[in-house]
Amino acid sequence: MALVEGDLLRPIPSAPEHTVLRDLLVLADHTAYHLGQMTLVRKLMGNW
């Protein structure tokens, strides 16, 4: 587990101010946003 924690907090070489964990959280947030958009469109279209 310590190896994983160390890897998650390691800076990204191309953007040292960002960590792997930060990028994973941004990715999860972005994906959730688009999932919500698709859900809303399906609801508005009545396509359940």
Image (tube, helix red, strand yellow):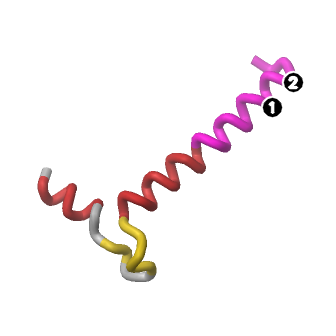
Dividing the picture into quadrants, the one containing residue 18 is bottom left
* 36 magenta-colored: yes
Q: Which residue is rendered at x = 54% and y = 47% of the image?
A: 29
Q: Which residue is rendered at x = 44% and y = 82% of the image?
A: 14
Amino acid type at circle 1 is Val
Q: Which residue is rendered at x = 80% and y = 31% of the image?
A: 41
For residue 2, the mark is none
- Circle 1: element type: helix
Indicate whether 36 appears above or below 6: above
Number of callouts in the render?
2
* 41 magenta-colored: yes
Please name the residue that numbered disc 1 is placed on: 41
Q: Specify the farthest residue to the right.
A: 45
Q: Residues within 10 Å of mark 2 (few under 14, many from 20)?
A: few
Amino acid type at circle 2 is Met
Please name the predominant secondary structure of the magenta segment in the image.
helix
Q: Residues within 10 Å of mark 1 (few under 14, many from 20)?
A: few
Q: Which contiguous range is marked in magenta?
A: 32-48
Q: Is 28 left, or right, of 3 in this rendering? A: right
Position of residue 3 measured from the top left corner of the image (x, y, whole percent): 15, 59
Please name the residue that numbered disc 2 is placed on: 45
